[in-house]
Amino acid sequence: MSASEQDARQAIIDAAKAILEETVQIEKITVRQIAARAGVGVGLINYYFKSKDNLLSIAVGDVMVKTICDFTKTNVYSDLGSVAKLKMLIKELYTLAGSNEKLIRFVLSREILEGNMQTPLSLVPLLKEVYKNQKSDMQLRIIALQILYPIQVTGLNIGAFHMYSGIDLNDIEQRNHFIDLLIDNLIDPI
């Protein structure tokens, strides 16, 4: 892919991210809107991404991975222990995703169905810090999945999870308690 093709592709992704930030109705976003914002033809979106849903998944995935990368690079949480940092990161991701329930359902269902591993992989460096080389890379990857999949599945149907567990994930305190319990149950006492 040439530099100009990469630039056009990135402009499309950036346009999709901007539109996602502006709207609460993901189903009303059109390929024409995205193309107009990016300054490209509709055909280019279909060429690079095959569908609007693929493009939107990539755009949201980029935001999530950027959040994880920014979190791990910042010194704001440097005084916290590594397990506390992990909990904080998951809470931050959930808050980011939870601001638009339709969007999160859309993204989670696509990530789960398509087996997108970008988000779990981005947790591995923080898990390395937690386990201090006591776990292999494969073990860390599995732990990352064990952390994210329950969060993804419960996010797909918050009401059903509330009936099952009594935990209302729309309530910040209850959601944070759920994340703390999840991490504590999965992370070996160190």
Image (spheres, rainbow, N blue to C red):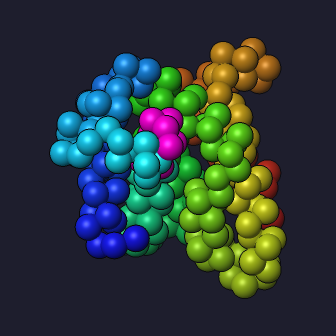
Magenta residues, as a range?
50-60
Kindly report the secondary structure that dominates the magenta region of the rendered protein.
helix
Please count the marks in the image: 0
The image quadrant of residue 188 is bottom right
> Is residue 74 rendered magenta in the image?
no
- Which quarter of the image is occupied by the N terminus? bottom left
Q: Is residue 157 visible?
A: yes
- Which quarter of the image is occupied by the C terminus? bottom right
Residue 119 location in percent, x, y?
Answer: 58, 56
With 114 as the anchor, is 172 left or right in this view? Answer: left
The image quadrant of residue 109 is top right
With 81 as the anchor, is 96 left or right in this view? Answer: left
Q: Is residue 5 above or below residue 63?
A: below
Question: Front-most of 157 and 135?
Answer: 157
Residue 15 location in percent, x, y?
Answer: 27, 44
With 97 as the anchor, is 164 left or right in this view? Answer: right
Residue sitting at x 62%, y 38%: 110
Q: Is residue 183 above or below residue 79?
A: above
Residue 14 location in percent, x, y?
Answer: 29, 50
With 78 as the anchor, is 187 left or right in this view? Answer: right
Residue sitting at x 44%, y 66%: 69
Residue 120 location in percent, x, y?
Answer: 64, 59
Q: Is residue 171 visible?
A: no
Residue sitting at x 27%, y 63%: 7
> Is residue 54 rendered magenta in the image?
yes
